[in-house]
Structures are given as structure tokens and as C-alpha cells.
Image (spheres, rainbow, N blue to C red):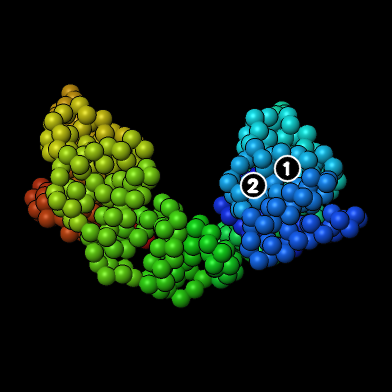
Amino acid sequence: MMYLSKSPRKSPRAISALRTAGLAFILLVLPMPLPVLAGDFEDGMQFILAKDYPKAVESFKKAGAQGNADAQFNLGVLYSQGRGVPQDHEQAANWFRKAAEQGDVPAESMLGFLYLKGQGVKQDYQQAMFWYLRAAEKGYAIAQHNLGVMYAKGQGVAQDYQKALSWYLKAADQGHAPAQAILAFMYLKGQGVEQDDKQAASWYQKAAEGGYAEAQYALGVLYAKGRGVPQKDQEAVSWYRKAAEQGNPDAQFNLGISYAAGTGIAQDDQQATSWYLKAADQGNVKAQFKLGVAYARGRGVTQNDYDAVTWYRKAAEQGYAPAEFNLGTMYATGKGVMPDDHQAVSWYAKAAEQDDADAQYNLGVRYDTGRGVAKDDQLALSWYRQAADQGYARAQYSLGVKYDNGQGVAQDYAQALSWYRKAAEQGHRGAQTNLGILYYKGNGVKKDYVEADKWFSIASAGGYEDAKENRELMEKLMTPVQVAEAQRLADEWAKVHQK
């Protein structure tokens, strides 16, 4: 996701930027024409370099009171950051306004930002547009980019991707990396422009080469998928690494995935977990989950169920369904935590409500058996069906059993046959065996010994003992020709399904 730039970039008058989580600390150094004003401003800059911020404020105030726009701008920054003075956003806005009203471009842009966020002034999108536009029309790339964002989001104006695109292009043509990256995203998604992977890759490349981590990560993804560029795993890893080393958590996670799979780089579980940890520490939920898996399995780290639970919990508390399911399983099995069926059901339910098929099936089992929750055949049936509708073979088999035996539903062999078949086609041995029994008995389908023996043969080939016994009994009732035909059909099925 792209965000509004929160500060002006270096202008020809800027010497350095001390960054914090909010505003860039940019101090201007071009002397003003009047010697007396320049002296106070220059004194202020010397105090800044010495990190004596209170004296810098004093000097800038003298210069600012006499109309020095650079000093006024720097006072705005100091008040915004609380350097040399108590943090005061209203005072910051006041000094930025003084500079902006003299036509100071970075100050105009900053004032637009303050109105956009309601920081030190009442939030007002129209005023934000007004000040951004003043700076943008003078060629200020950050203001151009932020205007594009406002048009894209419909903030203070009707949403208009074409106008957003126009402003992004102006900023991008000046080398503004965030604008280049958002242009790439628009081409990738066909947002306001005709969808074009090559154009997307081109703009991401420009931003990435400028050191923009978000674009480096996105370019890595394009190389991994072969979208707009040739598919090259090594190139993907190279760009992931550049972004990861700048602290981009998505890139760190993907680099971990690359090491774990040995894709584009030598397989290395320790490197994988190292990068997962960097991303996880920044709150990346997928990395937290992967770390949990690594500790649970002892991959790249010493096996430790307690650490696995810690990382599963971090991801689960952010609502990540796979982690919720795994945390439920840890409670169910008593690994890394005291066994607790109620907690298991609670976490399964959270994941199941997000359509996690594993969790839906396990929740169905819990209602079926009354473990950690009151036994309820209807709710068991409901959760089985939700998982089964997603193609989950074990749930399809369980539904087949319910219909076969009339548990919680009216007995219905046709429904049982249908669900057994769905699971059987996915290789579920129990479903294959029960499907054979329906054909043997003619329940819900015309009796057919050959079809029955086919399914017993398929299941027994997978080592299912009940199927082996059924096959032996079945073939005593069949002719050699029927047995041969059943084996032929089983072999054909195996060729198609077990490549």
C-alpha cells in the first residue's frame, strides 16, 4: 500500500534529514539576501549541527520574525518534532504557514499534509488540496505525488484515477520513487490505465534502482512470477534481499520462503528462520506463523513446542486463520501448553469462521464427539459440510458416513454415495472402501461387484486393511473375468490419479 509522503524531500536548499517515524527533519541553508537575517539563520544552522536545539530555535525565531522563510520552515520542523521546544503541532502549523504564504514550496507541501491529517489544524481536504496544488504546480514532486493519492482515494474530490495518474506521472518523471512505484501498481492492476505487466515492471525497476524498498520487493515478486519480466528466481531473490536489508518485512518473509524452499538460492533452513524472525519482529503475521511451524518441527532452530506456541499465538491474535488452527491443535494435543479442549474449540472456531477448512473439519469432529463443547449432530454436520464444500476430503468422508448411517440427517444412500465418491477421488482410503461397500450392497446405486472390487482394490493398494479384507471376500463371489476387469479399472484409476 502506498502512503502520502509526510515531508518534503531534499530541495536545493536542504543539507540533511534526521528522520523519525513521522516527519523528516529537514533544515534549509540558503542565505537570504539581507545580511542581518542571514546571520541569525546561519547561527541557527550552526546550533543544529552542534545539536543545540534550544539555541537553534532562538536564532531561527529571530530570523523568522524578520521574514526569513527558511527559518520559518525550520521552526515548523522543530515544533513538529519537539526539538528544542515542547512538541506543538499548532505552532508548527503556524510557522509552516508563514513560510508557505511567502511561496516557500516545501512549506506549502507540509501545510497541505497538516490539513490532510488534521495535525495542528482542523482537518480540511479542500485546504490540503489547495496547498498541495500550489506546491505541485511549481514542480514539487512530493506534492504532485500526494495530489495523486488524494485523487485516487477521492479525498476532497471525486475519485479520479486519470487525474491521479497525471500527477503521479509528473512526480515520477522527476524520479520520485513512491510515485514511480504507485504508477507501477496502477499498471499492474489496470487502475486508470490499460493493464500492462511490462509497464508495471518498468516503473518498479526505476523506483527499485532508486533504492525504494517497496518497489524492490514488488519487482522481486514480478521476477518470481514472470510477470512483465522473464521468470528468474535468482533475480527475485536479489531484489528481495535489497528490500529486506532495508527492513521491508514482506521482502524479509519472501527471502525466508526462498531459503526454505531452495528457490533461487541454496536451501538453508537456518537462513530461512533468520529472515522469518526479522519479519516476525515487525509484526508480519505470515512470518510469525512460519516461525511457529519451524519451532514445532525443529527446522532451522532447535525444536521447541513452547516457542512454537508463542509465535502461533502472536499470529493468531492478529486473526491469521492458519495460526489459529495450529494454536487450537496445540491445545488439543497439549504441546507447549496444558491440554485444554475448550481452548482448542475456541481457536478452531475463530479459524473456521474465516473458512479455514482444517478448522471447520476439526470443529465438526468436536461437535460430533462432544469434546470441549456440547455434542451436537446438527452443528457437526454443518461444519463438515462447510469444509466438504471446499473440497476437504476428510469432511466429505464424514458427511458420507452421516448420510450412510442416518446420523443427524435422514438416511440417504445417494447422498452418502456422492460424498464418498468426492473423497474417494481425492485418495481417501476410508471413502474408497465405503464406496465399494455401497456398490456391493446396491445401496443408493445399482449393485455392481466389479465396481465394488475396483474401489476395494484401489484402497487396498494404499495399505488399507479393511479394504484388503473386503476385496478377498468380494472376489470369492466373482468370476475370474470380473476380477480381471475390476483390476483393469483400478489400474486405470491409479494411472490418472497417482502420477
In the picture as drawn, the residue positioned furthest to the bottom comes out as 266
The answer to the question of whether label 1 and label 2 lie on touching residues, with beta carbons closer than 8 A, is yes
In screen coordinates, is 338 left or right of 173? left
Q: Residues within 10 Å of mark 2 (few under 14, many from 20)?
A: many
* Residue at (71, 38) in percent of width and height: 94
Query: What residue is disc 1 on?
Result: 95
Point out residue 217 in the picture as x, y percentages from the top left corner.
Answer: 58, 59
* Of residues 263 and 52, the one drawn nearer to the viewer in this rendering: 52
Considering the numbered disc 1 on the image, is that residue within a helix, a strand or a loop? helix
* Of residues 290 and 263, the one drawn nearer to the viewer in this rendering: 290
* Residue at (65, 37) in percent of width and height: 90
In the drawing, what numbered circle is on residue 79?
Answer: 2
* Of residues 178 and 400, the one drawn nearer to the viewer in this rendering: 178
* Residue at (89, 58) in percent of width and height: 35
Q: Residues within 10 Å of mark 1 (few under 14, many from 20)?
A: many
In screen coordinates, is 310 left or right of 244? left
Against 74, residue 149 (above or below) is: above
Point out residue 465 in the picture as x, y percentages from the top left corner.
Answer: 12, 55
Q: Amino acid at mark 1?
A: Trp
* Residue at (79, 51) in percent of width and height: 63
Q: Amino acid at mark 2?
A: Tyr
